[in-house]
Amino acid sequence: MKKVFAMMMALALALLGMTAMAEGRTLTVEGVGMVTVDADHATVSLGVRESGPDVMTAQGTVNDRMDAVIAALGEAGLARDTMATGGIGIYPNYDYSGEIERIMSYTAYNSLTFTVDDVNAVGTYIDAAFAAGANTLDYVEFSAKDTAEAGDRALTLAVQSAQKKAATLAEAAGVTLGEIVEIRDKADMGFDVANAFAASEDAGKGAATQLLPARQQVSATVYITYAIAE
């Protein structure tokens, strides 16, 4: 009797194990959605760099030219509260040709960062700054200020992509999809901005600086886990 009972228990446990295995079968797929939006915001960094025989000469030249740059940007229509100092410094230039290194001159620099909501006006501001004395351009970055709606659309597309992929895989494998067990999305959105900056071929003849605002890609990734129905 005990032997029969033990066999029945073993059979019951085996059946439970098979059921657990069947219920635990899942299919996880990844879906990616991407939406492209127009850039409507730009950040520019430019400045002045000059050398002089001593610190005060170099710094004084930079200060005078930077004051002129800021004034020119204001006259061009750029609000003062959109401008900020990006970096400032002075360093010595050494002569290493002899046995003893000597300071030959000093270089001072001052960079200015400003933001522009009218991306079509970026080239105008750059031209105004250089006409006033700026001689360095560090970068021009385009971006989209409001990507919330684009992010929602990207998530929707990502879910649809995952659903389609799951259906294709299930059909190919000859199984039936059950309920969704889990949906996960990446914690952050992905942004891909290809900035475009081009000086005209006639720049030396006084042609305006040309900038081509890039479009911004907002992407989202989701992972959906389906139960496999029996």
Image (spheres, rainbow, N blue to C red):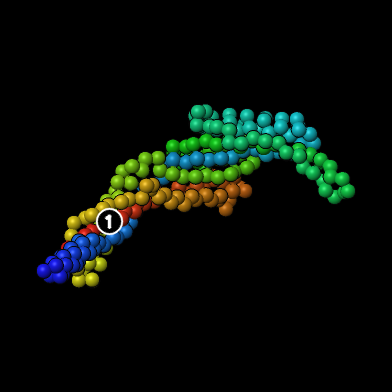
Residue 164, above or below 186: below
Residue 228 visible in the displayed image: no
Residue 145 visible in the displayed image: yes
Residue farthest to the right, as pictured: 99
Residue 221, above or below 18: above
Q: In this view, does 191 lie to the left or right of 125?
A: left
Q: In which quarter of the image is the N terminus?
A: bottom left
* Nearest the eye: 6 or 212: 6
The local crowd at label 1, few if under 14, some if 14 to 19, many if 20 or more residues have their Cα within 10 Å, is some
Residue 3, above or below 164: below
Q: In which quarter of the image is residue 134?
A: top right
* Nearest the eye: 171 or 148: 171
Q: In this view, does 136 lie to the left or right of 39?
A: right
Q: In which quarter of the image is the C terminus?
A: bottom left
| Residue indicated by mark 1 | 224
- Count of labels in the image: 1
Which residue occupies 43% across, 51% down? 192
Indicate the position of residue 50 as horizontal and vertical percent values.
Answer: 71, 38
Q: In which quarter of the image is residue 149?
A: top left
Which residue occupies 23% across, 71% down? 173
Which residue occupies 58% across, 29% down? 71
Which residue occupies 81% across, 40% down? 103
Q: In this view, does 175 lie to the left or right of 186?
A: left
Q: What element carries label 1?
A: strand
Q: In this view, does 129 lie to the left or right of 62?
A: left
Indicate the position of residue 204 as horizontal and vertical percent values.
Answer: 62, 48
Residue 84, above or below 19: above
Indicate the position of residue 172 as horizontal and vertical percent values.
Answer: 23, 71
